[in-house]
């Protein structure tokens, strides 16, 4: 396991996730525990960018320069010493949504809150393609005696259409596209499995036959008690998956080989994002301790669609 030098650039956040580099070089992160998006600038200062309500989760820049946010609908929380963690549904939970946030004004609009007449359950992470749309995971929500199934959806950024692409999945979380945009990667949180799907067209994938219950091809399954969260792709095609409990970023090759596990000073390093001119600055959300860490990544990250849009 690699133990890099990590600089803590922000503290005092309420379960941060979804780091996104904005065109001015600042970093936007969600605070799931506060229902808002914060902008982090030099010196670790953070200010309110937008109030979303609910539980803002993964987010990405869209073709219009706005932030597109997966909102899981909100959690109830438990404090354990210095850790704050989600433990159940918020008292006012009514479903999840995809929100559009104007960076200049902080104005928040709901783009989608249902598909085929059914409410979204817990949208979690998002990635844009080059066809004017985005894939996102819906993790589902754990209730007292049952759990909603998870799924992958595809929506158009202009709000014109949404469809379900893969169903069912067990708590799908991180999602990303290969450098050539031909492969969709999805991490299942509770099984600690990483799946791939070959893209057949915008919002369509080729499905593997039985016995694959979700139609995906298994890239790797991590043993032991580990949970997978968000993921990002390196320029090389390696998949960098946030690995909870172990407290690291697991780097997996497209062939399913564990290349490295990069240690983090928090057992819940939930999300990472590549930034900077050379895309080798990695920003990691250390969610239990409410911090943002920055480190130099061993290889160049992949530039996302619309990253750097002014």
Image (cartoon, helix red, strand yellow):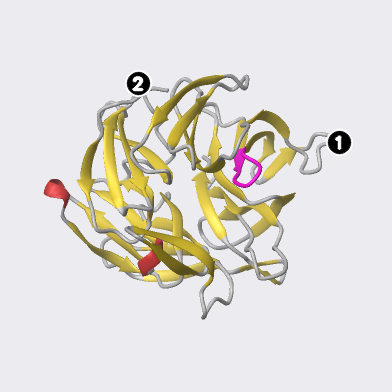
Quadrant position of the N terminus in the picture? top left
Residue drawn at x 70%, y 31% is 218
Labels in figure, total: 2
Which comes before the other along the chain, label 1 or label 2?
1
Q: Secondary structure at mark 2?
A: loop
Label 2 packing within 10 angstroms: few (<14), some (14-19), many (20+): few
- In the image, is residue 96 part of the stretch drawn in magenta? no
- In the image, is residue 187 part of the stretch drawn in magenta? yes
Q: Nearer the viewer, residue 14 or 133?
A: 14
Label 1 packing within 10 angstroms: few (<14), some (14-19), many (20+): few
Q: Is residue 277 left or right of residue 266?
A: left
Q: Is residue 248 left or right of residue 265?
A: right
Q: Is residue 53 left or right of residue 175?
A: left
Q: Residue furthest right?
A: 210
Q: Residue 303: horizontal and vertical position, in percent?
A: 39, 33
Mark seen at residue 298: 2
* Residue 217 seen in this snapshot: yes
Q: Residue 89: horizontal and vertical position, in percent?
A: 55, 71
Q: Residue 113: horizontal and vertical position, in percent?
A: 58, 69
State the image quarter where residue 274 is shown.
top left
Residue drawn at x 26%, y 37% is 294
Residue drawn at x 67%, y 39% is 201
* Residue 24 seen in this snapshot: no
Q: Residue 57: horizontal and vertical position, in percent?
A: 45, 57
Relative vertical location of residue 28 with respect to residue 47 in this rendering, above or below? above
Residue drawn at x 51%, y 80% is 92
Mark seen at residue 90: none
Q: Which residue is mark 1?
A: 211
Magenta-colored span: 186-192
């Amino acid at each position: 396991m690699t133990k890099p030098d990590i600089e803590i650039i922000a503290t005092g956040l309420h379960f941060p996730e979804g780091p996104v580099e904005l065109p001015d070089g600042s970093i936007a992160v969600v605070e799931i525990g506060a229902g808002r998006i914060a902008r982090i600038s030099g010196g670790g200062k953070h200010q309110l960018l937008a109030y979303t309500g609910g539980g803002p989760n993964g987010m990405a820049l869209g073709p219009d320069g706005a932030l597109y946010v997966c909102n899981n609908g909100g959690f109830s929380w438990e404090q354990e010493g210095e850790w704050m963690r989600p433990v159940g549904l918020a008292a006012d939970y009514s479903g999840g949504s995809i929100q559009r946030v104007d960076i200049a004004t902080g104005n928040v609009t709901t783009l989608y809150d249902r598909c085929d007449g059914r409410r979204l359950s817990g949208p979690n992470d998002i990635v844009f393609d080059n066809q004017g749309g985005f894939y996102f995971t819906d993790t589902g929500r754990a209730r007292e005696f049952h759990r909603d199934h998870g799924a992958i959806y595809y929506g158009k950024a202009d709000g014109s259409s949404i469809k379900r692409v893969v169903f069912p999945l067990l708590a799908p979380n991180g999602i990303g596209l290969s450098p050539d945009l031909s492969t969709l990667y999805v991490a299942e949180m509770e099984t600690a499995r990483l799946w791939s799907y070959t893209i057949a067209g915008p919002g369509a994938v080729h499905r593997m036959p039985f016995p694959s219950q979700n139609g995906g091809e298994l890239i790797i399954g991590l043993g032991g008690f580990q949970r997978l969260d968000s993921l990002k792709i390196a320029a090389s095609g390696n998949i960098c998956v946030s690995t909870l409990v172990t407290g690291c970023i697991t780097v997996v090759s497209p062939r399913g080989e564990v290349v490295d596990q990069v240690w983090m000073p928090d057992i819940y390093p939930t999300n990472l994002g590549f930034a900077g001119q050379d895309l080798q600055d990695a920003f990691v959300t250390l969610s239990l301790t409410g911090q943002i860490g920055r480190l130099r990544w061993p290889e160049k990250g992949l530039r996302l669609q619309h990253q750097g849009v002014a």
